[in-house]
Amino acid sequence: IPMPNSWRLREARRKLAPITKFTSPVFVDLSKIPKNVGTGPGSRPILFIGNHTIYGLTDIPFFVDHYLNKRGVLVRALAHPLVFAAGQTGAGTGIESLGSLKVSPRNLYRLLANGNSALMFPGGSREACKRKGEAYQLRWGDAEEGNGSRGEFTRMVLRAGGLIVPFGAVGAEDNWEIMADGDELVNAPVLGGMLKKQFDKMGLSSDPARRWKNSDSEGSEENYADFMLPLARPKAMSRMYFKFGDPIDPLKDWSGSKGSGEEREHCSTLFKEVKASVEKQMDDLLRLRSLDDFENTPKRLLFEQASDVRAPTAWRWSNGESNFE
């Protein structure tokens, strides 16, 4: 898989810099991730798995930029084709310039086979297109789906001999108040019919993030709503927080064979473990955020303008630098 154009990568990061300064993202426990993985051919691949934030536009740029700054490794994110279409119209966030690829089993396999670092959101468009009351909730389906669609990533990482690193992201959901969600919009008189026709015209009747074994129905009312971004109004800009869980090694305690019932059971267990860890990271961040004296944006910006340093957090002072990176 070719690397993104170096000039476009620099430009995307330059444009992201003011937003990064404004939101002052906090990354916790990056030190848990081994430094000798996901660096390219010959190294063990790594797949980051996390929760998709509302609209799905803030998590990838901040994550990729920070990891590149700290580790010198470009994480290749897998994103929905709609995001690339938005980028062509000028409405996107430059994630293609940051090395993102269209989500598909083939692209994930190519990244893992080449020892790369990859980033994926099993919740797909359904998780980015939040419904009312769904802040910081995963929409990955039931645990048994580890044997199929959304959990197929566990099998691919297992066969590639890679690592899975769960992470949680908190902050974006608090920036918006949903006025009308996807369910309400696609079922609205006149407007709903127009939206469905447009989705059919674009060939987006099912989510590529879930199209692993053609196990999802297409063209249903629920799937139409899965692509409908909520109509929301902005609120006060919240600080962004990311937290990494312990790496999960699919090869640990594994001695089965490819395609066996034992493999299916093992992957289902891995799926549950990854999902539980992502939920734990979000819960931890929501608790830690309450300890951050600079979560409030105006106060944080005043401090950073006056001191010319990034605003610290309460747990940074109490626990030391090792878990604040």
Image (cartoon, grey):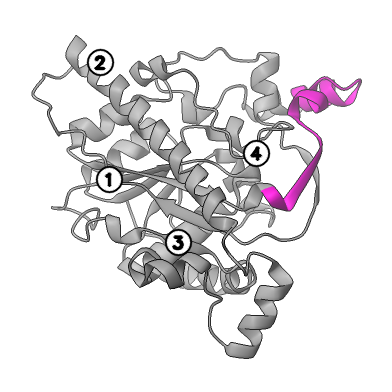
Q: Tell me the distance, in whole angstroms, between the alpha carbons under discs 2 and 1.
A: 20 Å
The residue most toward the right is: 189
- Graded by Cα atoms within 10 Å as few (under 14), some (14 to 19) or many (20 or more), the crowding at tag 4 reads some
Q: Looking at numbered disc 4 in the image, what kind of residue is underneath it?
A: Ala
Residue tagged 4: 135
Q: Is residue 92 above or below residue 165?
A: below
Q: Image check: 155 left or right of 283?
A: left
Whether 196 is among the magenta residues is: yes
The residue most toward the front is: 318
Q: Position of residue 1 (x, y in %)?
A: 32, 50
Q: Are marks 1 and 3 in contact (CB under 8 Å)?
A: no
Q: Image check: 38 left or right of 103?
A: left
The residue most toward the left is: 255
Q: Tell me the distance, in whole angstroms, between the alpha carbons under discs 1 and 4.
A: 25 Å
Q: Tell me the distance, in whole angstroms, between the alpha carbons under discs 2 and 3.
A: 33 Å
Front in this rendered view, residue 272 or 316: 316
Counting residues from the start of the chain, the first of labels 3 and 4 encountered is 3
Span colored in magenta:
174-197
Q: Tell me the distance, in whole angstroms, between the alpha carbons under discs 4 and 2.
A: 31 Å
Counting residues from the start of the chain, the first of labels 2 and 3 encountered is 3
Q: Which mark is nearer the camera, 2 or 3?
A: 3
**Which residue: 51% across, 60% down?**
62
